[in-house]
Image: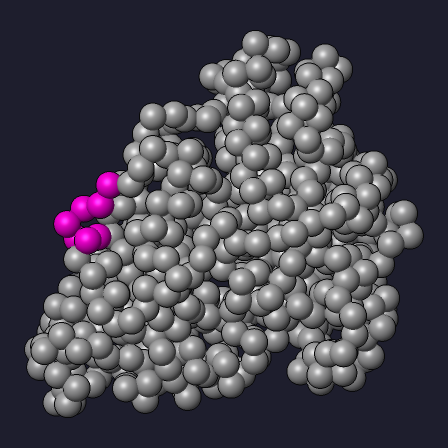
Amino acid sequence: MLSDIEIAQQAKLLPITEVASKLNIEADELELYGKYKAKLSDELSKRISSNPDGKLVLVTAINPTPAGEGKTTITTGLGQAMAKIGKKAVIALREPSLGPVFGIKGGAAGGGYSQVLPMEDINLHFTGDMHAITAANNLCCAMLDNHIQQGNALMIDPRRILIKRCLDMNDRALRNVVIGLGGKVNGVPREDHFIITVASEVMAILCLASDIEDLKHRLGKILVAYSYSGEPIFAKDLKADGAMTALLKDAIKPNLVQTLEGTPAIMHGGPFANIAHGCNSLRATKLALKLADYCITEAGFGSDLGAEKFLDIKCRYGGLKPSAVVLVATCRALKYNGGVPKAEVSNENLDALKKGIVNLGVHIDNMRKYNIPVVVAINQFGTDTDEELKFIENYCKDKGADFALANVFADGGEGGVTLAHKVVEACEKPSDFAPIYSLDISIKEKIETIAKKIYGADGVNYTTAAEKAINEISRLGADNLPVCIAKTQYSLSDDPSLLGAPKNFNITVKDVSLSNGAGFVVVYTGNIMTMPGLPKEPAAYRIDVNNDGKIVGLF
């Protein structure tokens, strides 16, 4: 079989103007980045602002495993399948991050015959959004250190600087660094840290800002440090907000591309719901809802991470009400959750499936707690047996969830027609979406609600550092914000080794920080790396360019 990149390179792409016309977007409402990519202009947003909203469908998944789930592949295939059954649909996706592309994944634009194109551009520099976010973040850091160098009128305490530099690459050597060495002219020496760009608050702000004015306001509210007297210092105090906004002027505009079958796809915002909120931008989703009858979007990792944050943070701020949730799983991944090694997940094993399917059960229950109809999509592999698939189908029906097999990897939109019909039916069912916690309760109560209701934990433990941070945030009057919990994606608990549906465990909160501009409190549990490292054999080993200028090895 052809590789993903070979399939992508053999595809005949439509001019992006033709893709846009499917959504009644006029040519002068596009800002073109070559033939096949475009930014969607502010003029378009204004023109369609009075259009009725379409149906919002969220695609999420069970906890990811090495056996694979294919959430983006299903999202893309479902969008293509909607067109097959005569529905006007657009998919709204997150942009890949360079770090994992060169580190673990080698690509993140779907797979097989359900890909978003041009996949090489999307996986690499795309329209420069990530670079703009990196530059804006690091400008603020540079202005902070310059302020200290130039007399430190704000009396910033170098020991209490909160904002970190960022880079859109996996690089463990930059996690902890010392800057300002080499004498007085090179600045004030201090300890500093790098995080990956998609974990930065600037990324979150871009994803949640409604317009340029809101973007500038949020950037100005970033809590960058404390003074020697304990007073908060914000980005606006450094006079950094205007220049940061200037760098993000184009990045805030959503990007229009297409699937392999020419279905419109809006890509905007970053991944990583284990260390960020992991959703595409609010602007992209709202635009998609105005442009089509169905908006198919996704959130990062399992429902315990991306979906929870989508529903409790993004939907709350955007006033969104999802009509249905698609929950992606594979037979292979469920057997892995049942204790089968990765090398053996292709073999029929009903006993392991029965043990591992409890993970799917928790995710179904979690989504139903938000009062939204759930459709389970099984991303089908050739090694799945009829008996295994029948068992999963019966299990889902017993749980009150619809069920559909999808073979969109091999068959594109045609392989998702059954799923598309199920999703359309689900969207017509009654729903009464509401977040699972109120903003009026304390930070600890919000954390404990998520831990108990979504993870299945017995309770929450807090380190001394976490307790101190919560008290500090409450003192600043920010305890009325939603919480964004950083947690391992591999388990419902904060221990990645606990598969299936763990019981009798507590979540340990190691630290808490305030993303004041984004508008949420970040809660760190377990061993979470905000700057990932490269594996022993990075995907970069396989990526190259041939003599014809074609990229190879990118999946």
Would residue 101 appear left or right of 520 to someone viewing this image?
Answer: right
What is the number of callouts on the image?
0
Q: Quadrant of the N terminus?
A: top right
Query: Which percent across, then down, holds residue 69?
Result: 60, 35
Residue pushed farthest right?
A: 86
Depth check: give the residue in front, 147 or 406. 406
Residue at 22 percent of width and 77 percent of height: 232
Q: Is residue 463 magenta?
A: yes
Query: Which percent across, then down, holds residue 99?
Result: 44, 53
Depth check: give the residue in front, 134 or 370. 370
Q: Quadrant of the C terminus?
A: top right
Residue at 16 percent of width and 83 percent of height: 148
Answer yes or no: is residue 109 visible. Answer: no
Q: Which segment did they paint magenta?
A: 461-467
Answer yes or no: is residue 479 visible. Answer: yes
Query: Which percent across, then down, holds residue 328?
Result: 64, 37
Query: Which percent across, then down, holds residue 440?
Result: 39, 62
Quadrant for residue 229, please give it. Answer: bottom left
Residue at 45 percent of width and 57 percent of height: 438
Would residue 264 appear left or right of 534 to someone viewing this image?
Answer: right
Q: Is residue 35 magenta?
A: no
Residue at 54 percent of width and 83 percent of height: 212
Q: Is residue 218 above or below residue 95?
A: below
How was this image coloured?
A: one colour
Q: Is residue 97 above or below residue 44?
A: above
Q: Is residue 193 above or below residue 187?
A: above
Quadrant for residue 233, please give it. Answer: bottom left
